[in-house]
Image (spheres, helix red, strand yellow):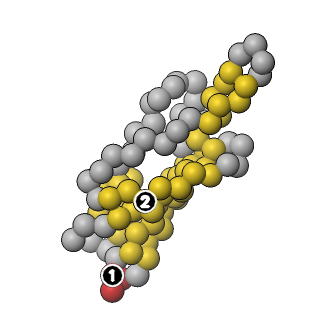
Amino acid sequence: MSHAIHTVVTYQNQKTITADIAAGAIHVFSEQVLDHGSYRSVIPVESFKVSFDRGHAGLLELTHPIQVTGVHNCVRRVVKPLPGGAIIE
């Protein structure tokens, strides 16, 4: 059974972006940029939450903190279903 995964990305400025991602699909979230006038910086992702309906087992929600600093475009996570739940790799 395939699932659509509802994802909420939270940036360190507390702004959130959501997406519904089909099972097996790849989604790239946009960067949040802060303009300082003479230069720009990227606001890091703080965490993301995924949720999907498991039918008779109900809604599953997982929150995953992001602990990467100083590197651009390096966060890649895969949500894999497990019996009775899921894992984020």
Residue found at the far right of this picture: 37
Decide which of 48, 82 is in the foreground and name it: 48
Question: How far apart, in angstroms, are the residues tagged by discs 1 and 2?
Answer: 17 Å
The location of residue 60, given as percent across then percent down, is 43, 72
Decide which of 70, 72 is in the foreground and name it: 72
Residue in the picture at 33% in, 81% down: 55
- Mark 1 crowd level (few <14, some 14–19, many ≥20, 10 Å Cα): few
The location of residue 82, given as percent across then percent down, is 28, 65
Determine contact: label 1, label 2, CB under 8 Å: no
Residue flagged by tag 2: what amino acid is it? Asp
Q: Nearer the viewer, mark 1 or mark 2?
A: 2
Q: Is 82 drawn above or below residue 67 in the view shown? A: below
Residue 57 as seen in the image, left or right of residue 32: left
Decide which of 37, 69 is in the foreground and name it: 37
Residue flagged by tag 1: what amino acid is it? Gly
Q: Is 45 drawn above or below residue 57 in the view shown? A: above
SS state under label 2: strand
Residue 87's quadrant in the figure? Answer: bottom left
Residue 43 as seen in the image, left or right of residue 27: right
Q: Is 53 drawn above or below residue 49 in the view shown? A: below
SS state under label 1: helix
Residue 67 in view, yes or no: no
Question: Which image quarter is the N terminus in?
Answer: bottom left
The location of residue 54, given as percent across then percent down, is 34, 76
Residue in the picture at 45% in, 62% down: 6
The location of residue 26, given as percent across then percent down, is 33, 46
Q: Earlier in the sequence, mark 1 or mark 2?
A: 2
- From the image, tell me which residue sits under label 2: 20
- Mark 2 crowd level (few <14, some 14–19, many ≥20, 10 Å Cα): some
- From the image, tell me which residue sits under label 1: 55
